[in-house]
Amino acid sequence: MRWSLLVVIAAACNGTPAGSGGGGGGDDEPAIDAPRPTSDGQPGVRGVFDPLVTDVTIEIDYEAGAEPYTGQMLGFGDTFDLGVANLDRLFAGKKALTLPRTTATMENIGAVPDQELTVTDLIALAAAHRSQVDTPTKKTYYVVFVGGHFTDANGPNPNVLGVSLGGTGVIAMFKDVIRGTGSVALPNVPRYVEQSTLIHEVAHAVGLVDTGVSMVQPHRDATHGAHCTDDRCVMYWLNEGASDAAAYVQQHVLSNNSILFDAACLADVDALTGGP
């Protein structure tokens, strides 16, 4: 399938990504995109790549006015096709993947008054609204779309697109920042930015790169934490900014391959699943 104006942006736009391996806002807060064991560190809960886990459910909630992009794009299929294709490939098509595609299958959590959201705030939102739970055969992840900005000890960061809170299965997507990646000339870019960011953050949550999922061959970016060294991979730390996005579009978008993981990342997960 051909994807037009597909921009891969890892965890931030025009700034240091939240997925750079940094910690949360305090000693009692989980790290962002932190190293995490394959078993998820929860007693009695299997890791997502355990063969006994047959179902993967991604729950999506959203703040009022910050809902994900959904629906058909003329000539390019459903907005969520990209996310489904990549996450299904992550599991080699061997697990039943549930990923909502419409707002009717997501939950509107109403207004979130605080628009400077810390790790603690995001964990609290998940505690209040998350409804899916892990079972011996099902692994769940919770994604919440919010307005405002991710905030840490350095203050609000207007560049962070999304964060994965290591070991919790909680992912936050910052809609105001995602919207800001588009223009009149490139109206579909934010849709693809949103999907690629979702793919990136879910991949962090399941343990890529070398944070629970071991590497077959070295490809971890030592400088930027749990990210791939290949700038063509969705797990690269930085494919962002106007010039970088334009270069990426020119070099990669017109290919017929909609899978955004590089061969090294796919080799890592295929070693666990046996591959497609």
Image (cartoon, rainbow, N blue to C red):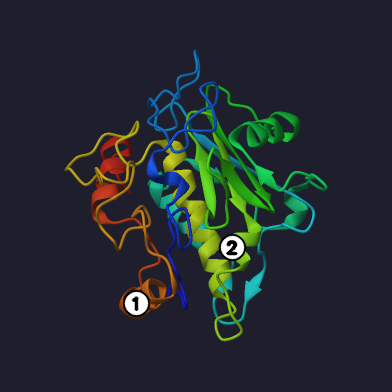
**Quadrant position of residue 186:** bottom right
Q: Is residue 222 left or right of residue 257?
A: left
Q: Secondary structure at mark 1?
A: helix
Q: Which residue corresponds to the image point at 42% horizontal and 53% vertical from the top-left? A: 16
The x and y percentages for residue 31 are 47, 31
Q: Tell me the distance, in whole angstroms, between the alpha carbons under discs 2 and 1.
A: 19 Å
The residue labelled by disc 2 is 178
Q: Quadrant of the N terminus?
A: bottom left
Measured along the vertical axis of the image, is residue 73 above or below residue 32? below
What residue is shown at x 40% (from left), y 51% (from top)? Answer: 89
- How far across and down, in percent of the image, does residue 116 sit? 67, 45
Q: Residues within 10 Å of mark 2 (few under 14, many from 20)?
A: many
**Which image quadrant for residue 19?**
top left
Who is closer to the viewer here, 137 or 187?
187
- Residue 275, position in %: x, y? 30, 45
Drawn side of residue 61 relative to residue 48, left or right: right
Residue 247 - label = 1
Q: What is the residue that sits farthest to the front in this orientation?
A: 154
